[in-house]
Image (cartoon, grey):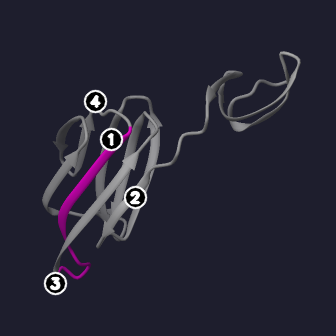
Amino acid sequence: MGKRDGNGVFTGHMDGKDTVMAGVWKHDIYIGPKPSPPKVTTKYNVVSTSFVRNGDANKITISFYQNAIVNFIESLEITASSGNEVQSGNYTNIYDIRFPFNCKINYQSWNSLKTQLYDCILEFEIYEPGSWDLRVGN
């Protein structure tokens, strides 16, 4: 018989009682309920967002794209509930964040034809601890 690993629902007998447990298992050990996914609370002149959890480092890397290539944005302002912000080329990293993590991003982005500059706002919350990549599309 295999070991439980990942998300799921366990229905069976434990300690002589019928039991139903929904959540996350790791190496056959119940970790807890499945965390809520990241939630976008404000999206103004932002076409898309993509959150990917890729480790346990308690950081977020934010990158901006337009038409599937790097978008060189202007006037970037980030207000985060915790962490230390570091700019690295076209990426912004926020290290040592605490969860739940709240963030507001204000910036300006040119349209695809580079004829008009738009004000953009993105606000979001992340509940599950870990290392996150956020791709913002304009």
Residue 115: numbered disc: 3
Query: Which residue lies at the image location 38% right of the left edge and 49% below the top edge?
Result: 125
Q: Main secondary structure of the magenta part?
A: strand
Q: What is the spatial separation of the Cα atoms under label 4 and label 1, in whole angstroms?
A: 9 Å
Residue 138 visible, this angle: no
Residue type at mark 4: give it. Asp
Residue 40: numbered disc: 2
Residue type at mark 3: give it. Thr
Judged left or right of residue 3, residue 62 is left
Q: What is the spatial separation of the Cα atoms under label 1 and label 2, in whole angstroms?
A: 15 Å
Residue type at mark 1: give it. Ile
133 relative to 123, above or below = above
State which tag comes first along the sequence, 3 or 4: 4
In front: label 1 or label 2: 2
- Disc 1 vs disc 3: Cβ atoms closer than 8 Å? no
Judged left or right of residue 29, residue 2 is right
For label 4, the residue is: 96
Which residue is at the front of the view, 65 or 26? 26
24 relative to 29, above or below = below
Residue 60: numbered disc: 1
Residue 101 position in % (x across, y down): 34, 41
Residue 35 visible, this angle: yes
Judged left or right of residue 94, residue 9 is right
The kind of secondary structure element at disc 2 is: strand
Provide the residue span drawn in magenta: 100-114
> Which image quadrant is residue 11 in?
top right
Magenta stretch containing residue 121, yes or no?
Answer: no
State which tag comes first along the sequence, 1 or 3: 1
The kind of secondary structure element at disc 1 is: strand
State which tag comes first along the sequence, 1 or 2: 2
The kind of secondary structure element at disc 4 is: loop
Residue type at mark 2: give it. Val
